[in-house]
Amino acid sequence: MIKIDKSAYSSKFYDIIYSHDRYIIAFGGRGSGKTDSFYLNYLLELFQPYYFKLAYINKEFRNIRDNQYAGFKRVAKRIGIYELLKFYDGDYRIVNPINGNSLIPKGMDDPEKTKGLDDITAIWWDEISKSNNLEDFTTLNALLRSPQAQYLQFAISFNPISETHWIRSYFFDKDNAYELNEYFRYNTLLNHSIYKDNEFINTDEYLDTLVQNAHGNINRANVDIKGLW
């Protein structure tokens, strides 16, 4: 089991890194560091004494190499565990050769998108807001049934780009866009973050970047800077 110092992550994401909740919903503005907290979380799970197999999801498989796969590599190098793991550059699997725990990529543009996802114990879908299909979520969620699992978990992370998205109506309270509904309220870790929560960047400089990118677009500024629907 690998132990890391608290300086390796922003305090806002402590709960994510050590969560065994059935669901994790991490959302908010850009640059908050929420994605890196999932890289760290699931890399650490590879070294646990129990069986762990994560499916990490992207809307398009061709984006996995430069997004999640590259992110896992970067964080593994940063915390000094890169040489302990096997990174397969051909299909983007990441495996701990000692215990067999693994991270398995899957693109939702694959017509056989559930093939090969047997005995998975966890799923993480980053930028799930790019998917317009609730059925993709429910199909994947139904795969979480491995009898070998220490715990089962489905994590999603996204920027709240549209209040009309199915994510809003499926997970959140009808009258409060920042509270979970009754179906998810008691088994879900909810984490909302913005750029100010990232302890590894110059927040003033990054705010300038977000303001310039918004270029007067109030909706984009609300999403990117404040993490609002």
Image: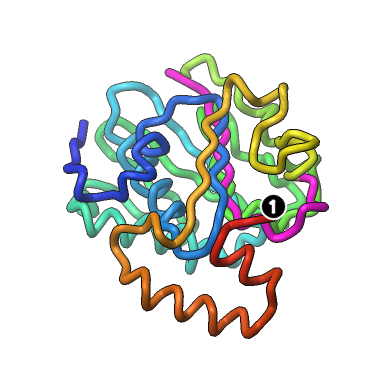
Query: Pointer 1: what residue?
Result: 108
Magenta stretch encompasses residue 152: yes
The C terminus is located in which quarter? bottom right
Residue ID at (57%, 49%)? 27
Q: Which residues are magenta?
A: 150-166
Residue ID at (57%, 40%)? 25
Q: Which percent across, then down, holds residue 92?
A: 46, 56
Q: Which percent across, then down, holds residue 83?
A: 20, 53
Mark 1 residue crowding within 10 angstroms, few (<14) / some (14–19) / many (20+) = some
Instruction: Count the numbered circles shown.
Output: 1
Q: Which percent across, then down, holds residue 151?
A: 47, 20
Picture quadrant where residue 208 is located: bottom left
* 80 left or right of 209 in image: left
Looking at this view, is 181 or 98 the one in front? 181
The N terminus is located in which quarter? top left
Q: How is the image coloured?
A: rainbow
Looking at this view, is 7 or 121 the one in front? 7
The disc labelled 1 sits on which kind of residue? Met
